[in-house]
Image (cartoon, rainbow, N blue to C red):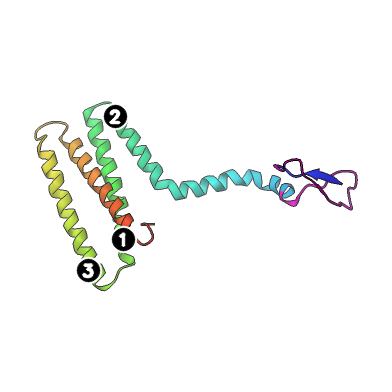
Amino acid sequence: MRFQLPGAAGDLIATADPFHEDRPRTPPFRTNMHHCKPLLLPCVSLFLLSACGQDLKLKRLEAELETAKNQGEMNVKSYELRCHLEGKLKSLEERLQKGLDGTELELFQKSTAAWRAYLDLEVAFEASWYEGGTIQPLMANTAANRLIEERMKALNERSPQGGR
């Protein structure tokens, strides 16, 4: 019997099917696939959600901040985003520390403490421009978020595994 493989440009392949000589034999990868189809989407979805779960939360928080309707809501959403980014940074720092020892670990810990002091001072400085205004928390959180993202990018670039 002869059949055409899917995707092949008109190439026919001869096969022998001793049980059903009157019809073409389906390649094994096609016969088994119909059993897997119901499981394929949930498995792929679960994999993608676990791999991208943090990024999905980040996207959601950013979208909530963008769609905030008033100053109070923007202040709250920017703070939630800041907390999420601080958590991601903390996780990244912990992963990086596991690969360090001796002098490297000591220097990394000192660098991290110095960077956190810089973060606090820089955020306070930038927020001071808006002293007394309802926008001050938003501006402080925006400055912190920008600096945290820059720090994570720098640590990921220096990391042997890319921070993963």
Identify residue for label 3: 106
Percent position (x, y) of residue 68?
29, 29
Checking the image for residue 94, the label placed there is: 1
User: What secondary structure characterizes most of the magenta part?
Assistant: loop
The residue under label 2 is which amino acid type? Ala
In the rendered structure, the answer to whether residue 53 lies left or right of residue 33 reads left
User: In whole angstroms, how far apart are the C-alphas of marks 2 and 1?
Assistant: 33 Å
User: In whole angstroms, how far apart are the C-alphas of marks 2 and 3?
Assistant: 42 Å
Dot placed on the residue nearer the N-terminal end, 2 or 3? 2
Residue for point 29% across, 52% down: 152
User: In whole angstroms, how far apart are the C-alphas of marks 1 and 3?
Assistant: 13 Å
Residue for point 32% across, 29% down: 67
Checking the image for residue 50, the label placed there is: none
In the rendered structure, the answer to whether residue 60 lies left or right of residue 139 reads right
Proximity of marks 2 and 1: CB atoms separated by less than 8 Å: no
Identify residue for label 2: 68
